[in-house]
Amino acid sequence: MFDAASPPQRPPAPRRALCSFVLSVLCACACAGHAEAARLRIVAAEAVYGDIARQIAGTDAEVVSLMANPAGDPHLYEPGPAAARAVAGADVAIANGAGYEPWFDRLLSASGAPAKVVIRVDRLPGVVQGAQSGNNPHLWVDPASGPALASALVAA
């Protein structure tokens, strides 16, 4: 018989504990999926720019360098399917520019889903190029290119 004066009965402790555990796991899974989806995806044509991006973004980004070997020759590099997938999935793409990696523009246009932000180091303010640099396309040796790229990445 139900007594209106008696307090309502609570579910047994093991059932409450199980419900709490299940809710905690569901919340943790939802938060983990959201955090992973929020990571910025950066693709860099050369390792040096990928290294700078890793230092700036830290754990907030997944960084892929297409030419991971710094000794690689960009004139001989032939991007494969993995490079095409990396470019297609990128939020930010970084290239040297100045004609250094002509294949990168082809990858960008063929990706079908161009990066939201494309950073070309040769177009960053303060980077010396052309006749002023002795027509040296290796823009990462210019002391101004690192800080200019860092500023562009922070703005991205």
Image (cartoon, rainbow, N blue to C red):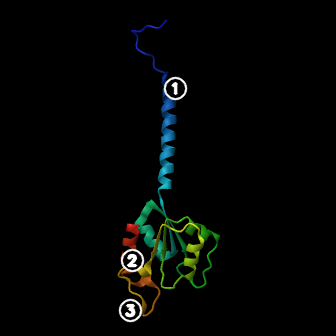
Residue 142 picture location, percent across and down? 39, 84
> Residue farthest to the top?
1
Judged by depth in the image, the label closer to the viewer, 2 or 3, is 3
Amino acid type shown at disc 3: Gln
Residue 87 picture location, percent across and down? 56, 69
Q: Which label's residue is closer to the chain start, 2 or 3?
A: 3
**Which disc number belongs to residue 146?**
2
The residue sitting at 56% across, 66% down in the picture is 113
- Secondary structure of the residue carrying tag 1 is helix
The residue sitting at 48% across, 38% down in the picture is 24
In the displayed structure, 118 sits above or below 60; it is: below
Amino acid type shown at disc 2: Gly
Amino acid type shown at disc 1: Arg
Dots 1, 3 in contact, CB < 8 A: no
Residue 37 picture location, percent across and down? 50, 55
Give the Cα distance between marks 1 and 2.
58 Å
Q: Which residue is mark 3?
A: 132
Judge left or right: residue 33 versus residue 148: right
Residue 156 found in image quarter: bottom left
Q: Which of 31/98 is in front?
A: 98
The residue sitting at 46% across, 75% down in the picture is 49
Residue 90 picture location, percent across and down? 52, 66
How crowded pointer 1 is (Cα within 10 Å; few <14, some 14-19, many 20+) is rated as few
In the displayed structure, 156 sits above or below 45; it is: above
Q: Which label's residue is closer to the chain start, 1 or 3?
A: 1
**Which disc number belongs to residue 25?**
none
Q: Which residue is mark 1?
A: 15
The residue sitting at 48% across, 50% down in the picture is 34
Q: Which label's residue is closer to the chain start, 1 or 2?
A: 1
Dots 2, 3 in contact, CB < 8 A: no
